[in-house]
Amino acid sequence: MAMTKPMCEILLCVRDMRNVAWPYPQQGDVIAVVPDGWRWGACELGQAVEGNPNGNHPFWRIIKLPNVTVAQASNLLAPERDTDPQGPSPYLQYRQFYFDKTKIPAGQIALLQNLADDLRTNGFVTLNFTAAQLANVISRRPALSAPPS
Amino acid sequence: MATVSSIGTSGRNYSTIAAWHAAFANGGWEGECYNDSEFVHSSTVTLGGTSSANYEKLTAAAGQSAFDSAANPLRYDVTKGVGITCSAGYVTPLYSSAGFLTISRLQVRITNGNARGCIAGDFGAGAFHIDRCLLQEQQTQDANRAALFIADANNLVTNTVCISYNNTGIFCYYATGSTIANCTIVSPSDKSSVGKAIANFGGTSGITISNTAGFGFGGGFTDLSSSTGDHNATDQASFGFSSTGSLTSRTFANQFNGVTSSAMDFGLKAGSDLIDAGAADTTDIPAAGDIAGTSRPQGSAWDIGAWEFAASGGAVYAITAVKGAYALGGEAAAFRVGRGLSVVKGSYGLSGESVALTSARKAAAALGSYVLSGQTVTINKGKTLAAGFGSSALSGQAISFHKALGMAAAQAGYVLTGYAVRFGGGGQIWTPQGPVTVAWSPQASQFDVWTSRISTPENWIPL
């Protein structure tokens, strides 16, 4: 019996979105996790849409993860949670974990090029990481004690 | 100028609500959801603007809301319109983190457990307004969950249905100054919720509750005793605060079309105590409409709850125009018994069309533009055909009158020249001036005449 790869796709934020209400997405945050074959919107694909001031949405990338399930990747969507319920923080961040480009292994040239491609001419990039390999490039955001400057 | 974006999975601007919000731009950020597929959130989606000028608004695109049709039942049904739900526990489908937010014409459901509410928030600088939404909470964990969780002050909830299976309808957390107006807050009758319709989660000294129905909750209407408001309704013996002009101890099943979880429809049923029992509130609801857009009031006063009852009154009559100026873009127009059809200006042309009116209906034209030339008009016994001025032209038509019925023309413009008129015994013709031509009939036994002359085909009858 043929095996189907547990493919998912993620929408990755590559800039701090400071004009969005706090908590705003930061560089490395995953905005959305969807199953393989998802019909992305024109703005998510980097197409300029008339009347939309964000142009080709240079702050986003779409990455295909053919060896990671939606459930596994959805862990990246969890918002930061209070570590002390008795003293809730007003500075909880958009996501608890982020895609840490400083941990990308050498040799992932296509991925690095894609992350640098603000014109989004490269379209999708496929990352053949397993869930365990993906975890190696994920970091936990440090808690904030003051609003981000 | 606001940026309006489409959201959906059929080639829209954005495919997820999370992505739409994450691309926020100043000047007003408005998202219109399409019912391409159900929006399923695996994590909490935060929303909110940054100021009153840089606001955020999430709604359904035109024709995409379940409540764009008043025929749809008031329960979560994604086959009827845009629906948002979650796929995991602890996930609040929509969370207002900053305020300056309006959510309208959407239905949201949570089933997985431990979510604070279908919609929750906000602790931001601004407030949120939830309008014409349906929030259905089906969790079973504990009473600390609700269909709607209001945090922070001065939020507004209008024309919204909150359904809670086992918990609380609306929780208020430091929500002093918030307003709940014309909402329907219910727990299905077979669920026996131990929660309250509206409950204090903490830090709320009082809110305003008006025109709101709370039914099916074992824990009472509210514990916010410092609240103010009026014209509310409940199945409880009291509200828990001073609510003037309100209804208590009303039977749940007598108010709504369906109150069990298997047959929910929280639109008002005929005979409901909530009909015409509310008060006008164009401060909180300036459009004076209900969840489905039906204008308020339909009767003598606003109804209590999210739904404004519009009497069907029986069969629906259709109006169709094959051609002419009555253009509805191909739609069929219908009106019900007891409803009026009116045209303000003179563009309502039915030339060449047939118009049928059932007994006790009236067709009126204020000016002389209502032309029925070439049509057949039938009037049954006991009905009247009147022309206030001389513009009602029936030239060339056959008119039949039954026994003892009158035909009157106020002025001389009502012309039947050249046509056969037949009267039964006891009939009478009256005209202030001018000739009246009558075809001779042996059955015409008597005429009372106040005019210059009468002619028959055979001879003149001198006065």
Image: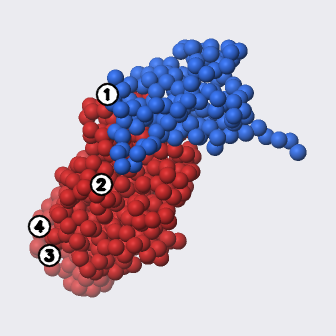
The hue of chain B in the figure is red
Q: Residue at x 47, y 21 (%)?
A: A15
Mark 2 and mark 4 on one chain = yes
Q: Are marks 2 and 1 on the same chain?
A: yes
Marked residue nearer the N-terminal end (1 or 3): 1
Task: Residue A129: give x, y in percent of width and height.
Answer: 71, 29
Question: Mark 4 belongs to which subunit?
Answer: B
Q: Answer left or right for B50 relative to A66.
A: left
Question: According to the colouring, which chain is blue?
Answer: A
Say what amino acid the circle numbered 3 marks.
Val
- Look at the image and tell me whether residue B179 can be seen: no
In the rendered image, which quarter contains the N terminus of chain A?
top right
Q: Mark 3 = which residue?
A: B449
Instruction: Give the x, y percent position of residue B438.
Output: 26, 71
Q: Which marked residue is nearer to the observer: mark 2 or mark 4? A: 2
Same chain for the residues under marks 4 and 1 in the image:
yes
- Asked whether, in this view, residue B313 is left or right of residue B139, the answer is left
- Measured in 3D between alpha carbons, the distance from the residue under mark 3 to the one under mark 2, in whole angstroms, is 84 Å
Please name which of the two marks, 3 or 2, marks the residue nearer to the observer: 2
Residue sitting at x 64%, y 32%: A135
Q: Which numbered disc, 2 or 4, marks the residue that appears first in the sequence?
A: 2
Residue ID for mark 1: B27
Q: Which mark is residue B432?
A: 4
